[in-house]
Amino acid sequence: MEQAKLREIRFQLHLDQKTFEQFRPIYLRYEQEVSGIDIRNMARLMKVEADSLSFEEADRLIVNQLETSKKLIHIREKYYREFRTVLSPQQIIKLYQTEAELRKKVLQEMKRRMMSR
């Protein structure tokens, strides 16, 4: 899965071999840090029925979502500086777009497989 993701990113960012070899270890470290964050917390806030939550539950959900967002922003800020050593800002935007598109495809495939059971 990781290799397929890296191939797609390389293709979308039009990276030559030398640039890709410089980018790859930075991206793998970035990916490892991001994967340590439970991003589902962020999406959960938008899907929950607010009126069904107690004051404390709603407060906890918001605080957890804010903490998750802070962690993700911190990682992106940290790795932006590293990505900039090998990528242009435009390529970094494409990287984030490609990641979002890949996440969307994976989720769609998971849903499709769940429905076919």
Image: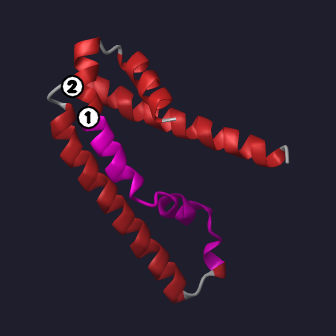
Instruction: Tell whether position 28 is magenta.
Output: yes
Q: Residues within 10 Å of mark 2 (few under 14, many from 20)?
A: some
Query: Number of marks in the image?
Result: 2
Q: In the image, residue 54 lies at what x, y percent?
A: 58, 87
The residue labelled by disc 2 is 22
Q: Is residue 87 visible?
A: no
Q: Tell me the amino acid under the disc marked 2.
A: Gln
Q: Residue 11, labelled with which disc?
A: none
The residue labelled by disc 1 is 25
Instruction: Tell whether position 110 is magenta.
Output: no
Q: How is the image coloured?
A: secondary structure
Q: In the image, residue 22 lies at what x, y percent?
A: 21, 25
Q: Secondary structure at mark 1?
A: helix
Q: Which stretch is magenta?
A: 26-51
Residue 41 located left or right of residue 76: right
**Which residue is drawn at the image coordinates 62% and 68% (left, top)?**
48
Q: Tell me the amino acid under the disc marked 1.
A: Pro
